[in-house]
Each structure stands twice: as C-alpha cells, then as structure tokens.
Amino acid sequence: MQEINTREVSPQLNHFEKDYDQKLRPSNFSEYIGQKKIMANIELMVQSSKMRSAALDHLLLAGPPGLGKTSLGLLLAKEMGAQMHMISGPGVEKKGDLAAVLTNLQRGDLLFIDEIHRLPIAIEEILYSAIEDFRLDIIIGQGASARTMQIDLEPFTLIGATTRSGLLSNPLRDRFQASFHFDFYNSEELALIIQNNTQKLSLSLDQEAIFEISKRSRGTPRIANRILRRVRDFIVVKGSAQGTLPDVMKAMQLLDIDHCGLDQMDRKILTVMRDYYSNGPVGIEALSATLAEDKSTIEEVYEPYLLKEGFLIRTPRGRALTEKALQFLAEVKV
C-alpha cells in the first residue's frame, strides 16, 4: 500500500518526515488543540493519579491516523514525569519480545503500543495478567511437564492506539479502564494548529493563507503540517517575507490539492464512477479492476475521506456517487 506514504493528503506518517513531525508536536497540554472532551477527561485523570501517587489508568485511544494519539501519549508521559516506551503491534513477533519490554518497565512508566489491534492473539494474551494484576505469566516447557512461572511487574500504564477499533479483541478492549475516540478537526482548530506551527518553523503567513491551508487539510493535523511544509518551501524559494493567499493557492496547484482537499486519485475515482458506471452503484471488484488499484487500497486509503465528506455512499449493490459529488465534478470540470 505504497500510496499511503506518497500522497500529500495521506494521514499516515511518512518515515522521512518523523523529525519534522516531532518538531511540530505540542509540548504541553495547553498547546494541544482540539479533542476538548478527551482532554478534559485526560487532565482530570492525570490530576487524580498524581494526588493518589498511583499509575495512570490504562487508556485506549482510537480513531483515524494523524489526529494526535501519539502526541497525547507523549504529553502524558511528560505530565506524569514518567518514561515512555513505544512499540508497534505488527513489530512484536514473539512472546519473548513483549515479555522483555514488560519486565523492563519501571514504576509509573507508560507503554504505548501503536496499532495494538495488529498484535497476534497469542502475544496479546500476555497482556491480560500484566494489565489486570501487574503480573507476567510465563509457561515453561511443553505437555505434561509444562509449568507456569509468575513474574511481578511494576505498576505501569498501557496506552493502546488503534485506527481500527473494531478489530480489537473483546478480552483486550474490556481490560482498558478508559477509552477515547478521536474526531476529525474543524477548520478553526486546524487554523490554530497551523498558526502555532508557523512560529515553530520561523514562518510568517497571513490569516487568509492559514485558513486556506486548514480548509484543504481533510480535518487532520498531520496533513495540515505536511501542506504547511510544502508552502514553506514555496515561500522560501520565492524569497517572500510573508506567505499570502496567492502563495498558498499556487502551492496547492503544484500539489494538485483542490478546495475540498481531494487529490488526483480522489477525483479519478469519482470520475470513473460517473463516466464508466453511470454514477453507480458499482462493486468494489469492478472499481478496482477499472482503476488498476488493489481493492484494499481503495477501501482503506481512498474511500474513508470520500465517504466522510459525503461524496460516496455504500449501498447493498455497491458504491454510488452523491449529488454533492456530481456538483463537485461539474465545478472542477473533470
């Protein structure tokens, strides 16, 4: 699924932009914009944990990529004065790998597991006793001679992050003491994030330019930051002291991101459905064959935003264009 990392409007983190992404993360709770209900609950939990001198409750953070789950985890470690240990669910291949991480945790540490729904079940089961009783149960030997060894763990906090909460097993989900779902950001919240990050990048943008970026960022801070980086390059090469709305518009034209935040592939999907399938409904297999794209790539990479924004609907017979999509295609003349 290479498209995830090559599209400017992809919410996934590109390996090459990790340092840039780290620089723009909020440094404290007051800098964390959006997700107000989540933050109100989190700040209360942190305060209570400190007053009780106890480890923070285990948290499940769910929602689309790029909305700030990792940033919140890092802030929690900072606020609690604790160490953050970060691992990825798909990267844990053996029980011993997770056991080694758990036994090295110190009192109050935070263990952040990204894409936790992708932990193999056999490995996931190790977490059950670790979460509930701060105990690690290890089976030594096989068959009749097998025995269980128990290792006590220091009280710690597990933070699970997932983009597919429906794939999380019920036994694991039930063991989290708090669960929060991240929503997409509105244009005003994104504009505040962009304003803060222009200062971190020593960049000057007028308010019209900032708001135009926010409108094209698909409700996702990571996309806003990526677009901001490209706009910065445009302004630096141009030699301007301050970025203006025309600068942003020219940069967006180069990036091929339209006023709705759609890129070339998004528009191609809508156009194919209009021109080849009379606006739909069309099955995913037929659409995949016509676009020469993998079915799962269409479902997981391209469709979510088109569905969220009301350009597509799913019916029992397949995908279909909405009136909004038809109006959009008429406006952009594709």
Image: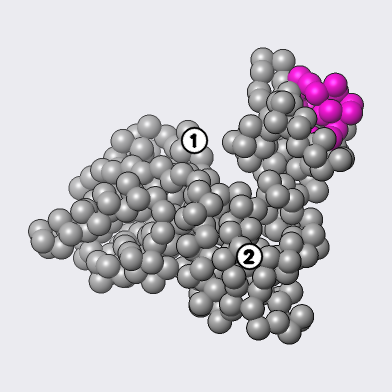
Look at mark 1 in the image and give the residue it sits on: 167
Q: Is mark 2 on a helix, strand or loop?
A: helix
In this view, the mark in front (2 or 1): 2
- Residue 324 located left or right of residue 267: left
49 is higher (above) or lower (below) than 285: below
Residue drawn at point x = 43 percent, y = 62 percent: 71
Q: Find the residue positioned furthest to the left.
A: 52
Can I make out residue 92 in this image? no
- Residue 186 located left or right of residue 321: left
Asked whether 122 or 243 is in front, the reply is 243
Q: Position of residue 258 (x, y in %)?
A: 74, 51
Which region is colored magenta? 270-285
Q: Where is residue 99 in the image (x, y as percent from the top left)?
A: 37, 57
- Kind of residue sitting beneath label 2: Ala
Q: Which mark is residue 97?
A: none
| Quarter holding residue 207 | bottom right
Residue drawn at point x = 79 percent, y = 21 percent: 280
| Quarter holding residue 53 | bottom left
Q: Residue 209 carries which label?
A: 2
Categorize mark 2 by other alpha carbons within 10 Å: few (<14), some (14-19), many (20+): many
Residue drawn at point x = 41 percent, y = 59 percent: 33
Q: In which quarter of the image is the C terminus?
A: top right
